[in-house]
Image (spheres, rainbow, N blue to C red):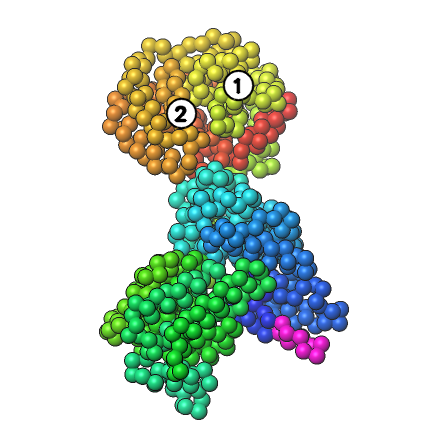
Amino acid sequence: MGKNIIVSNRLPLQIEVHNNTPKISPSVGGLATGMKSVHRDGESLWVGWSGMTEESISDSLRPAIEEAIQKANCALVPLTEHEVENFYLGHSNKSIWPLFHYFLEFCQFDKADWLVYKQANEKFAEVVLANYQEGDVIWVHDYQLLLLPALLRKALPNACIGFFLHIPFPSFEIFRVYPWREELLTGILGADLVGVHTYDYERHFLSSVKRLLRHEVKYNEVYHEGRITRVDSFPMGIDYDKFHQAALTHAQQKEAEKSELQKRLDSHLESNESSKLILAIDRLDYTKGIAGRIKAFEFFLNKYPEYKEKVRLVMLAVPSRSNVRQYKLLKKETDELVGRVNGKYATVSWTPIWYFYRSLPFDNLIDLYTSSDVAMITPVRDGMNLVAKEYVATRTDKTGVLILSEMAGAAKELNKALLVNPSDTEALADALQTALEMPIGEQVSRNSSLQKRIQRYSVTRWAESFMQALLKAHEQRQPHTAKKIGPTALQKMTTHFAEANKRLVFLDYDGTLSPFHDNPEMATPNDEVLRTLQKIQRMPNTHLVIISGRDRDTLGTWFRNLPFQLVAEHGVFVRSAEGVWTGSDQLRNDWMEHIRPVLQTFVDRTPGTFIEEKKHALAWHYRKTDPELAQKRVVELNTLLNSLIPDNLKILDGNKVIEIVHNKTNKGAAATQILADWPADFVMAIGDDVTDEDMFVELPSGSWTVKVGFQKTEASYCVSDTDEVASLLKALAEVI
């Protein structure tokens, strides 16, 4: 087992320079804490940016900084001022951040920023690759590095790569606005496992993958590029013991040991037996609902005037991205709102809002958590929100009430909190009144449940569960039973082909010889493939068969003057190499007039679908429609058809198509008959669909059966796509 390589935008370090001497201390953020179990001394490497641009590091300082970073088991990604401005402050926080938090009005889609974002991701990839050794496990974090998994996958096809998104993934209708959406999704899918905080984010991501990339998605697995990427939710926790123990220690403080902040808090609480403190802690960010919370508090004081001079809102806003325009405007708005409320309601002895615009040390946070009767955490959109969990963890006597926004990821776990819509001002005010009046017994009951959850699923458990799932996903990334055709298998195949006395080759058409097309009529065979097929057919004692679900007129037109045997409609009609068609014209098709209206109803209800009518079959194609709607309609149609069709018919659930055919019709029976007429000691069959599985099963042992794609199959081998099929056939054509 190799080392763990953690990759994030920032290293888990803080660098301060005093008297031309760097001082490096560990960060105390959620990610740095959470990754302690993964980032162990000597067993891991953390790759990221130091927080200092290349221009700000003098030549004299650089060796000392690099040495200190290396001692901390970290590797530095050097970023210039230009890259920080355009990659981090630019594209990451002016495009991806507002989009993923549903603030379309703040999005700036600048092509120059996007190019620098790509460039920065490539820099991170270079540093990871320079430090990677076979067997290492790579875990990439967050929205700044969405392209990195695919960059690493390209260089390291067999590496174990995980990715975790710490912010929400938006709904498809929001994400589709992003100009480089396909590239971003492809970047994420380079990972073996994609982790998010909640099932909603997982569902949104998979929906975008299905709709934009058109990849096959089964449950929480994406099939693409010969691999499977698994997507799952892992709600991030906190270091429960750290916060709980700090609160216990805090409760035992003597008066002389208390901080000035704690004394001020005590003073308010002791001023009146009915005095209460309401706590709000956030980064100063437009996603946190700060302005709405202040307005709700103002509404509360108007609606419930009896609480004037009894309650105080203690609001801590940690500075964030203060040089970005939206954040400057938010700071101005917050200052004005606080000033308005305090100016309107303050008395000589009472200020409604205590407003702190700064960071506070850990001990002061504990002061606030343990002293506050209510925590009001109301973001308009938040990936998780760990502050809500920290507050609950510090309630050692299990009193206190958490008011939590429904839009925070934490709301999925903390359902015993008072959940509110942060956009509903009156509901927020009413929730505040409910919290202040909540009986002690109910508070204890709610917090007991919340603490059990938070304690059980800590940040360490989060990291460990993700790593376990990542290793499992990596092991199972190719769960199909077929082996990929590599150089050894190809050599063995071509040798068998060359030495055989008689050769028989079965080839499906759509998805095998030609890629799928939204309009099936446009999926005509290309000239290069046709030349290869003709070359194989001209070989002595070689018989080539195109075996397809297509109708005979289409196949007959496409291969009109070519000496291939053709099998149409899964075996209903057969054309000899000489061009003579035979088939089951005696099969009745009067059933079609009863089924056609049913299919037409589904066409009417499902935009983008259409009916293909063959001599003895009907097919409902849904390749062009919305994948999620199609999934629903497929279930409906299958249920309805199973109740309608007679015993002599069957339903074929193929690749983006549902087909109704005769029971006796299948490629396996057709291939068996041809093999009886043309006994061969080299038999090959290549196909991509469930309809080809009958052929794989019926052909004799020792046949070369090849599945196009990476779904579970009865075939012995597999290839990625039609390009690999073309290469394989070309190799056969060049044998003799």
* Alpha carbon separation for disc pair 2 and 1: 31 Å
Q: Amino acid at mark 1?
A: Leu
Q: Residues within 10 Å of mark 2 (few under 14, many from 20)?
A: many
Quarter holding the N terminus is bottom right
- Which segment is the magenta one? 15-24
In the picture, measured across the screen, residue 126 lies left or right of residue 462, that is: right
Q: Amino acid at mark 2?
A: Phe
Dot 2 corresponds to which residue? 610
Foreground: 698 or 459?
459
Foreground: 537 or 51?
51
Is tag 2's residue or tag 1's residue first in the polypeptide sequence? 1
- Say above or below: 351 vs 88: below
Residue occupying the far right of the picture:
59
The number of callouts visible is 2
Q: Residues within 10 Å of mark 1 (few under 14, many from 20)?
A: many
Q: Which mark is residue 544?
A: 1
